[in-house]
Every structure is written in structure tokens, then in C-alpha cells.
Image: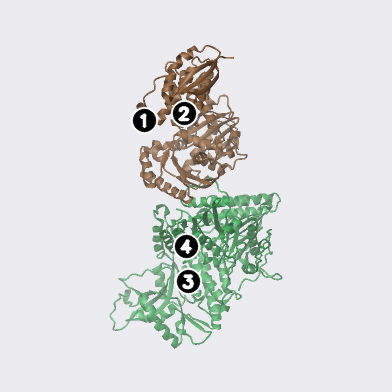
Chain colours: A green, B brown
Amino acid sequence: MAAEAFSNPAYFENRELSWLKFNVRILNEAKDRKNPLMERMSFLSITASNLDEFFMVRVASLKDMIHAGYAKRDLAGMTAKEQLAEISHETHDFIEKQYQTLNRSLLPLLDKEGIRVVTDFHDLSKEEGKFVDEYFRKYVYPVVTPMAVDASRPFPLVLNKSLNIASLLKKKKGVPNLLKGGKGGDSTVFATVQVPSVIPRIIELPSDEPNRQTFVLLEQIMLKNIGELYKGYDVVCSYPYRVIRNADLDIDEDDAADLLVEIKKSLHKREWGEGIRLDYDAHMDKKLLTYLMKQFNVTEDWIYPAGGPCDLTFCMKLYGKVEGKAFYKKPWTPRQPVGLPAGANLFDEIKKGDIFMNHPYDTFQPVVDFIRAAAIDEHVLAIKQTLYRVSGNSPIIAALQKAAENGKQVTVLVELKARFDEENNIQWAQKLEKSGCHVIYGLVGLKTHCKIALVVRDEEDGIRRYVHLGTGNYNDKTANIYTDCGIFTCNESIGEDATAVFNMLSGYSEPEHWNHLILAPIWMRSRFYSLIDREIENAKAGKKAVIAAKMNSLCDKGMIEKLYEASSAGVEIFLVVRGICCLRTGIPGVSDHIHVVSIVGTFLEHARIFYFYADGEEEVYMGSADWMPRNLDRRVEIVFPVLDENLKARAMHILDVQLRDNLKAYFLDSDGEYYHFDRRGKKALGSQQFFMDEAASRDRDNPENLFPRTFTPMWAAPKRGAEAE
Amino acid sequence: MKRYGSIYIGTFEISMKIYEIARGGAARNIDTKKKNTAVFHDIYRNHELSPETVETIIETLSDMQETLKLYKVTAYRVYGSYSLDSAKNILFVIDQIRLRLGLTVELMSNSEQRFTTYQVFANLPRTHFDTLTKKSAIMLDVGGYSMQLTLFENGTITTTQHILLGAADIREYAKRLSAKADYREQIYEMLQKELEAFANMYLKDVSPEYLIILNDNASEAVEKYIGPMTDGAYRTADYVKGLGRLLKDNLYSIQTNISEDPGRDSFYLPILFLLNAISTILPSKYVCFPGLDVNDGIVYDMAVHDRMMKMTHSSEADVISAARFIARRYGSYEPHLNVLDALGTDIIDTMKKTSGLSDRDRLIYRVAAILHDCGKYVSLSNSGENSYRIIVSSEILGLTHKEREMAAYVALFNRKDVLPYEELANEFTIEEYVRIVKILAVLRVTNALDRSHKQKFKKVKMAIKDSRLVISIAAEDSISLEKSLFESKADFFERTFSIRPVIHEVQAK
């Protein structure tokens, strides 16, 4: 088939709809009775915050496209308008399902377990009522700012994502009317107050009964006392609402003399972007709703009634507050990586051979220790690192500061544009600068997404470079919940490349040649194409040809077409794609050799691993890039080959086990939907649990025996199992 | 193990290389940085560097200085391309660099610049210099401002020519002519005109086996587009085809094929255009890129100086072969030159302890001796002046510009009175002036010994005895002509060295 034949829009799934399906898979985890209760609550919360971000960025940019008169169709052949219509439809359904899950399943189950979450203040007992009134007077009243709207007071700016309470007020008799009411002698006025973000959303009520806990939502406390805010007025009605605004960052970097200032400016803008979605209490007074819709300029399609508390992220706020081990998953303690004894000198160990880490099964601590050790090691001359998202009180930041104070040359590339994390990043960047680190704020026009740390050491036999390359951010907190891989190496040619990467990031030209690292946006795309082409040639020559790849998202047209070309040539392709997947499986002659699974588990699947059979040579690459246009064309990304045979086996083992997952994996069927596997007659295998068990039980003395050296993806012939309930 | 650094401010970019060199010569490049600048643009447009460019240079140098400190490099040098000399404010820029960073920037002459790269190419085993130049080869060192073409025959240099045409000119021509449909043909034609002169003069009986291109930026671009070399070289046909394919598009619309760095592209493309034209106009069987630049040469030079690396290739032989080639071109009488070369080097070697002449002076002497009467080709009456002109205008790879000028003055003063130092003070230091006069004294003596150009002396022995340089000779013919003229030359020699040369005639057997 000619290459252009693979570009038929019917062969592609729309990326937004594919993403919504991913959120459905997460919601399935919230529905899954096998998951502990609080884990289910947290999954529900994740679906809600995911959806907020989706609206702020994706829906917003589709709306921008329409405003701009952009009529081009996406790779699945849909216009922006068509996509929005589909999204509106799907998300209305989805949000309804979220509240069903909460109201019919999770809250009743919690209640049964003695955990009461009061979502309506009328349900409070007299005693409880007294407590919340007191709480309101003491803590809430002093920090809220109710704002009424009249002819001389315009509608206030309502902060993006903030929870608010809208009220209709009527002047009490005998009280002078300070507000200029509406037209036609209508004396009702609109007022709004923000539910303060400085006070916890969930407040636990005192209880004498053991094993029983009662929580009340902050907005309910405010609703109960709303009259206190509008003295002199009768409150006709009050309902919570929130608005999601356009938050897509669009910084004109060419004109940005100082990127930092620009980012700060656009952060400010984000809070006041165009209204994209209005969430409101399902019982809201029609008049009030119409008023809000008008103020936020939101149409019927983009208003979402909440069949429970607005903003479901409160579910996560309960996490940890609810007592009882049974409600939580068994905590996982990450283990010491194979080949790296605890307390050993990292540099000596790396010198002995490359080290592989599969987080969070393996602890992230060595990565922190790597920088810590470098900060105090007398032989270390320099530390260079990219930072994308770091944790609050990051020990890595602290170590880098210490290194700079110890006179090491520290160069840190802080990517300010990490979405929704900019404020955090600006703070770190300034902190690092103060301690004497050389901070680079990314490259104009490109987001620096690669994860690389380089330590230059002056050793007896000369300069030796120690490199950490990873698939995940240098964030010790998320490393416990994201699955990511990383390697330590002092391979000379990788060290050279790493030096060149940092030279490039600090504005120098590209080096004469690269040894091993594959960089986006320079030539990662063409390199992936040629790796796939080689498999195609082998398949055509009647040789075995296999590609297995694991990534977060697959939505690059060129890559998908290349995979179709490979499939049609007979290459067996196994993909583990967590989120968006615009590729369709099972199209005869196009994708019938492509198998896609998505794993949604307790840990967020985040590693990117790429395997090519290469006529038996077996090449494995890992890195920071997904097969998405932004990763391949608009970001600085690194994909690195796993050179050491033992390490290669480790990476292949991860793919192998994930492809055999029949518990938490969904497979993408030819109808574009995701299904669980039919496990009848098969032993259940959940890859995340498998890796935990493996890490907990492995024989540290014989690491070589741990992982098979050959990789043969085991593909259970996909048969639809029951969808998660 | 010692670390060396080199920073080079070129026409298009500032580059830095740091090497770790083990005793015995094993070298490892531990860091390389390159940054584009607007130096060429400024010089081309305004004949001076703009404040912005100066700021970029200083910032870049400051960062490079930090890198040198990071690797604890104490042995380093900072050089500027000879082309910087065309910026009217260069002295003040260099002064600013010194004041703000404490770095001393030395400007290289064209010959030094070319020789520095050539030297490392000729000496590193990995470049297979001997194999490449064994039969015949053209070595091309191309930069922003000019190019240097060097021809090798049978392993030795026959000529080297500096042509004032570089990538930057191509870029400017392309900009100016790009409105015309046939602008590429026009540029090509212009190039052809420039290079055909070289081909007609030097390649009549030579068909070069290799075209060796010393330009690591170009090698990078070529490798990216054509792929790596096989067995260290490209077949010219493949290479021309590959480059042609690349250049088929508009000169300014093919950036994406090579690099994401638009600053560099404006450099790459004209160089590739130039290389493409050169490989068609000066055809060879193979094309190769040793992948070296002037920084490699600077580091090599420092390492050799510190005896960390050895010099395997004799640059003296290159210099002499180039000088002889020039002498032949101008019809000099070779047997006479051979005698002068042999006698003079004998004198210098004999007087090594007392003369104060160095190995470089010995080389300058040899060049002066070989070329002292090449001016006769132009006119017999004013041959000294003409020799001086020819020597000054002939590039000799391996001699610095200053050294070439010294040789030229030796040739000039061989025929006329030596000018007092005051008149040459603009050009030479006192120490250099003294060296010129000493070399001249040797040349005058040896020239007198073969005044008849008949090579009458067969066995010559030299020795220092009682403040005299005794030249024992066995002559077959009468040497009365030589003897009669010798005395005045001996006076001059004695005034210079405080040693009097005397001829001691022995019976020829």
C-alpha cells in the first residue's frame, strides 16, 4: 500500500476523544470494588482534576481555533466545532457518571464504614450545626469577601477553578437599600463570595464515637451561615458554582527579553482567561444560572450541573484524614535497585557498570544521593541538570544549592513552562540563582523536557563524567507514584553527549557529532522512522520483525502512519500506551499487526521504552519523549539507547510483563474502545503488583539471574472481558 | 596527564576545545563549545565590530573562561582569526577583553592560522596524512573570509595558495543575486574563474587523488546529509551527487535539512555551495574530511611545546619543498641553490653554540637561500627587490608571515646595503633585526663561495678555531674568483658574529 494510503482520517482517533476515554479508564478504577475505598476516592478526584486541565487547555484551544476562524481538520478529519460538540456530549455523560459513582457508590460505602461526609448542611445535627457556626465565625468570616453586583458595581472577576457561592438577595424591610437593584423595580441583587482557598475544604467534626468520623465541606458551612455575610438582606437562594477558564499559555518568546517576567505576566493572565465551562449546583435557581451564564459568556453546551459537591477534587482532601488501614492500599516501600548496595559509594558503583532503576519499585533515593554526593565530593568539578517539575522542599534543589556553595560549578536548566507548575519553578529558579548556581531558563521556542543530570569528576586518570538519564522528572515525591526508568552510567561517549546537551542548552551550537543520544527536535523523529524502516525491511525480507514501545501518548500522525506501514509489511507491533492513542487497531491491511494496551493502576505509568528486534540485535531505547508532535518537534527531548546487556534485559522485562498484564490492562479493540482481557483459565497478572512482588523478593546476590535475557512479547489473544464495573 | 584549552575567535563563530593529553600523546577532547557571532557581518558591513557583537564576544569568552576554570585548565591560548584585523576597532576590542576578563587575545596571520591546522593534520596518526598525500592531493582549508589551497605531490607540498574568497562572500553574493533566476550559475561561474587560475597554473600535469577538506563545520553538515565516509573518504562522484541533491533547493530554504540553528545555517549553506563548486572545478578521485580545526592545532602546538606530544611529520621538509617549487617556477638555477643550502646549513650547524641562531633561523636561512635570486625571473637588474616581492607574496605553509618577511629581507639585503634598524623598526623587533642580519651574513658568505655558480668546491669541512670559522675546501678548479670576493663578505660576517670565516684550501685528490 502506498504511504499516503495510511493517512485516511478513518484510520485515526481524535486525540481529545481518546483522552476522554483514558479518563473513563481512570473512573473505572474509582468504580472498581477491588480497589480500597480511599483509593477509589482518589481516582475519582484524579478524573476531576484531569478534566479541569483538559478544559483549561484542550477545550480552550479548540475554542481559540474557532475564534480564529481555523477550519483545518484534525488527523481524524474533524473540525474544531465537530470536536467540541463531541466533547460536550461526552463530558456531560462523564460528569454524570462521576457523581453517580460518588453518590451511589462511594459516599454510601463510606457511610457504611462509619465515615460520614456531609454534602448538605441540612443533614447536620444540632450539635454539629453549632460547631460549624462557631467555625464559620472564628475562621471563615474573617477571610471572606462577599461581593454584590449592582449598577455601579460590575460583576467581579471570578478566579479560575475557584469554588464560589452565588446568592440572590432581597432588601429587608426597614433597611436602607445600598445596592442599586435591577431594572423594572426588581429589588433582587446578585452577590457572590469565594470559598476561601486558605481554609481546608474538608473539616472534620468532633465526635465522641470511636471508629466514626464526620466531615463537612467548607462550602456547606458557608451556605449554612450565608445570611451572616449579607446582613440587612434576605438571602433568597445560594448555590455553589465554579468556572473553568482558558489557561493555555501562549508566550511570545521572540519578544520575551526576560522569559521569567513573561511567564509571571502570563500566570496572571491565566486566572482571568475566557470562561470555558461552568459547573453549578444541580439545584441552582434558573434565574441565577442564566445570570451566571451571561456573565461568564458560557452557552448551554458548556454548563455542567453537579449532582453533588462542585469540584470533586475534595475527594483527595479526605485522603489521609479518613482513618483505617483497610481503606488504603498497602503502602509500598521502594527497594534498593539491583547492583546498588545501600550506602555504597555511588561513583564507585557506577564505575563498575551501568545501573538500572525501575521506579517506584526501585527507590528514587539514589538519584537524590547522586546529586547530594556530588555536592560534597572533593573530586567533583561540576553538576549540570535539567529540572522540569520538582517537589516542594526538593532535596535535589537543596543538594544543588549546597554544591554551588561548596564551589562546584552548578548549571541548572529550569524549565519555567512546565504546565501549571510555573509559579513553583520560578521560586526554585530564583532560589538556585541566589545560592550561586548558573540557572538557564529554557530555550526560546522550545520546552526543555529531557531528564538528564551530569556530574563531572576530576579523577586520577582524568575527567570522568557520570550521567543519570531518565524518563521521569527529578521529583522525589512523584517518583513514588509514577513508574519511570532511569540509568546511571559513566560511559565515555554518553558523557560526551551529555556535555554537548548542556552546551547546547546554554546557547552553544550543536556538536560535530553525537555518539548515542537521540535528541528532539533535531533528529529524533527521523531516527525513529529509520528504526521502524529497518523493521519494515526485515519483515519484507521474510525476517522476524518486532517493535514494542511503551509511552504515555501516541498521537503523532507521522509516527502512526509509519507504524501502519510497518504493520502492513508484517512487523509485529506491541504498544503500551497509557493515555491518548490516536492509532486504531485491527484495520485490515493497515493495522492488523498492531496491538495496543493501556495500563491504569495505582502508579501512574510514565516510562517511555522503545524496543526494536533489529534482526536479532535487539535495540532498546528509553527517554522522555512520547510519540506526540510536541515531543518530537517542539521540545528538547532525549532518547538514549540502553547499551549494557543486563540493563537491556531489564527494560525488555518491563515491556514483557506489561504486555502480559491481564488485570489492570485494557486492550484497544478495532471499534476504538478499550476492554479488559478475558481472564478465564488464565492466571491473573497485574504488572504493577508483579513488579512490587519482584522487587520485594528478588535475590540481590544474583542480579544477573533475575531477568530473562530474551524478550518475546506474550500476547494473550485479545478477547473482551467484562468492562470494569 | 595535562589539560589544554584553546579558544579561537573566527569570522563566524567563537569556538573552544579542551583536551586531556597523556604523556605519549593520547589525547581526549573533553569539551567543545561553539557560538555564532555577527563578526563577519559587522566587518563586511561596517569594517568594525558593533557594541552588541563585542558584548556577545565578551560574554561568550567569559563563559568559556569559566569552563576552562571548571576543568582546571591552566595551559590555554586565545587566538583571533587574521580576518579580525579588518575591523577598525579590533585593538580596542582586544583591550576590552583583556581588561574585563584578563584574557590575552593574539591575532594569527593567515599563514599561522593555516599552518596550525595543517600541522595537527599532518602529525596525528589517525588522519592518515601520509597515505592521503602519498600520490597527489589538494588540501583545502576554507573559512568565512578566504580559503587556502595546498597541493601535494609525492608526499610533499608543491604549492599553497591563499585565495580571498570564503563562505561569507558566497553568502553575500547569494543575497545580492538571489533575485535572479540563474544566480547559482552566476556564483558558480565566478568561482570557476577564481579557481581555474589555480588549476591552470598548478594542475596541468597533476590529477589529484584526494581533496582533503579541513573544516569541521563542513564535515558535520556533509556527514549529516550524505552519511559517514567509507574507509575514511567519499568517492567524489557520490559526494558531488549528494551535495548537489542538498543544494538543489534554494540556498536559503534548506535549513531544516541540516540544523535547527539558523545562525549556523547561514554559514553552512555557503560553505557547502563552495565545496560543491570546488569539487567540480578541481576534480579528485576522493574527498575526505579529517575533521580538525584550528583549535586542535593550537592545542597540538602547546602539547608539542610541553613535550607531551611528538612531532612525527617534518614541517621543515614541507617548507623546503614549497620553497624549491617556487624557485623552480621562477627558473632559479638549482645546483647553485643546493650548494648555498648545504654550505649555509653547515656554517649554521658548526656555529650552533656561538651564533645564537635557532632551528627556525636555520629554516629561514634555507628559504632565503633557495629563493634569494628568484627575482631574476622578473628582471636581472633589480633582482633583490623582485626576490623580496616574490617571497613576501608567496605563501609557504610552515613559515609564519613574519618569518617569510625575514627571509624576504635577507634576499633583498643580499644585493644591497642593509638598512639600519631604525628604518625597519616598524616591522621588526631589535632581536628579529639582528637575526635577519645574521642570516644574511651566512648567505653572503655562502654566496661568495659559489660566486661562479659552478659548484667548484667538492669537499667542504668546517670548524671553529681561535675565533675563526675555518672552511676547508678541496677545489678542482681555480677558486680565485671566489677568494677575491670572499674577503668583503668575511668582514661583514665577522662584524656580525665576531668570528672570521677563512678559506683553507686543501689539495683535491
Residue underneath mark 4:
A397
Which of the pair B496/B223 is nearer the observer?
B496
Q: Nearer the viewer, mark 1 or mark 4?
A: 1
The residue marked by circle 2 belongs to what chain?
Answer: B
Circle 1 SS class: loop
Task: Tell me the tag on residue B354.
Answer: 2
Quarter of the image that includes the C terminus of chain A: bottom right
| Amino acid type, mark 3 | Tyr
Q: CA distance from mark 3 to mark 2?
A: 102 Å
Side (left or right) of A292 relative to B226: left
Q: CA distance from mark 4 to mark 2?
A: 67 Å
Farthest residue, direction front: B466
Q: Nearer the viewer, mark 1 or mark 2?
A: 2
Spot occupied by residue A281 in the image (x, y as percentages of width and height): 45, 76
Classify A219 as above or below A16.
below
Task: Tell me the tag on residue B426.
Answer: 1
Q: Nearer the viewer, mark 3 or mark 2?
A: 2
Residue underneath mark 3:
A304
Residues marked 3 and 2, same chain: no
The residue marked by circle 3 belongs to what chain?
Answer: A
- Sequence-first disc among 3 and 4: 3
Spot occupied by residue A625 in the image (x, y as percentages of width and height): 55, 57
Q: CA distance from mark 3 to mark 4?
A: 41 Å
